[in-house]
Image (cartoon, coloured by chain):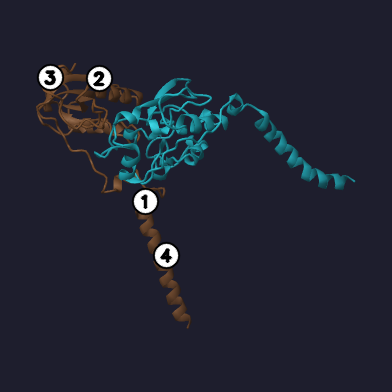
Chain colours: A brown, B cyan
């Protein structure tokens, strides 16, 4: 009888310990999940990875670096809460960007915009987070890595700007 | 006699001390004495998940997401910042605020009014921000900031990734009592959002 009780107690303890281990493994070091629920929700749609190839765009630049490793390390130090900051891109991804950042910068921390308003807003945000940011361009996208297009308001006021501006609007971009 | 007094004194003394502490708080300065009151008017339903947010607040980065503003003065520096947010979460005229075209009293009048009235405004520190048309870091999913339904408070003291709070816990219950979810649940103690499940 005692042996049966010991086996039952052992099984119960084992099950409870297993549940606790699984629960802890699924959470952060202090018992809380890292990141908002949307991160783990596969039903939340993501914006398309639009590179704006051929478009004249403005870039908010947070620095330029000789190597991608240096650029990645610098970018990792820069955070704005849960918001996306800069993207690491090669300077050759945009026509005119190498000249704008100088010979030393092969890799650039940048975020791309189709409108001056969008670039101004992000430059202000980066500035308030302590990162000096300057607006470069317009430069022409050669279709390099994604640099964050879609993070600005459509001038219509209906939502995010997810399409190219007309050639006339691009020509007027300053 | 002395023993008797000691027994009575043992009961009266804590009461007296409690009164001494509570009296200034009860009779002292309150924002309400200047005319402020909690209106609790026009609150939208608290949405759950992406579809809920779009149903209640519309598209991210739209004009309504940054249609109204309030001024927040940071207690540690005295710097005043203009914070833009969704028109359904504030911007209505009250005794203390001029109307800005919004349709509720939630964030500007009620939440920040309570923070003042409860003497915890000194914990609203550098820096604050609300509307931003940005993705959640490392994704292309729009942040609740893109709808103007999230506010970050005391960034420098409550960094993202910190699973405890050093400042915002003083007023987190005020946000929560007005429909806001605190990001501390996912180790982002600066962050409050008017939505669940996102």
Residue identified by numbered label 2? A134
In front of the other: label 3 or label 1?
3
In screen coordinates, is B142 left or right of A93?
Answer: right
Q: Quadrant of the C terminus of chain A?
A: top left
Please report, as a chain letter, where disc 2 is located. Answer: A
Check whether the beta carbons of the residues at disc 1 and disc 4 lie within 8 A of each other: no
What is the x, y in percent for residue A50? 16, 34
Q: Earlier in the sequence, mark 1 or mark 4?
A: 4
- Determine the image quadrant of residue B104: top left
In front of the other: label 4 or label 2?
2
Q: Earlier in the sequence, mark 3 or mark 1?
A: 1
Residue identified by numbered label 1? A27
Q: Nearer the viewer, residue B14 or B52?
A: B52
Task: Determine the CA span between mark 1 and mark 4.
Answer: 17 Å
- Determine the image quadrant of residue B155: top left
In screen coordinates, is A122 left or right of B25?
Answer: left
Disc number for residue A168: 3
Q: Is residue A139 visible?
A: yes
Task: Determine the CA span between mark 4 and mark 2.
Answer: 56 Å
Q: Earlier in the sequence, mark 4 or mark 3?
A: 4
């Amino acid at each position: 009888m005692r042996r049966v009780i010991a086996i039952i107690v052992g099984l119960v303890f084992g099950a409870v310990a297993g549940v606790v281990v699984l629960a802890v493994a699924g959470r952060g070091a202090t018992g809380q999940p890292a990141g908002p629920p949307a991160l783990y929700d596969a039903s939340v749609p993501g914006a398309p990875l639009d590179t704006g190839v051929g478009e004249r765009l403005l870039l908010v630049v947070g620095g330029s670096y000789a190597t991608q490793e240096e650029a990645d390390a610098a970018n990792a130090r820069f955070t704005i809460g849960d918001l996306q900051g800069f993207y690491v891109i090669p300077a050759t991804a945009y026509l005119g960007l190498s000249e704008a950042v100088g010979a030393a910068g092969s890799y650039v921390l940048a975020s791309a915009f189709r409108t001056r308003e969008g670039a101004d807003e992000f430059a202000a945000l980066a500035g308030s987070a302590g990162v000096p940011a300057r607006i470069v361009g317009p430069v022409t996208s050669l279709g390099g890595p994604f640099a964050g297009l879609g993070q600005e308001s459509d001038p219509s006021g209906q939502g995010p700007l997810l399409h190219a501006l007309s050639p006339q609007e691009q020509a007027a971009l300053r | 006699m002395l023993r008797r007094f000691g027994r009575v004194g043992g009961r009266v003394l804590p009461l007296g001390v409690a009164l001494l502490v509570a009296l200034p708080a009860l009779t002292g300065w309150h924002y309400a004495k200047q005319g402020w009151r909690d209106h609790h008017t026009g609150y939208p339903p608290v949405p759950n998940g992406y579809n809920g947010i779009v149903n209640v607040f519309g598209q991210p980065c739209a004009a309504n997401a940054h249609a109204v503003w309030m001024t927040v003065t940071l207690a540690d520096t005295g710097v005043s910042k203009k914070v833009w947010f969704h028109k359904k979460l504030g911007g209505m005229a009250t005794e203390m605020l001029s109307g800005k075209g919004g349709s509720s009293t939630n964030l500007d009048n009620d939440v920040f009014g309570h923070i003042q009235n409860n003497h915890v405004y000194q914990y609203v520190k550098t820096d604050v921000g609300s509307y931003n048309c940005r993705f959640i870091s490392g994704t292309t999913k729009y942040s609740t900031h893109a709808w103007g339904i999230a506010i970050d408070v005391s960034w420098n003291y409550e960094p993202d990734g910190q699973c405890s709070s050093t400042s915002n816990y003083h007023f987190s219950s005020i946000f929560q009592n007005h429909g806001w979810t605190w990001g501390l649940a996912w180790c982002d103690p600066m962050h409050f959002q008017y939505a669940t499940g996102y």
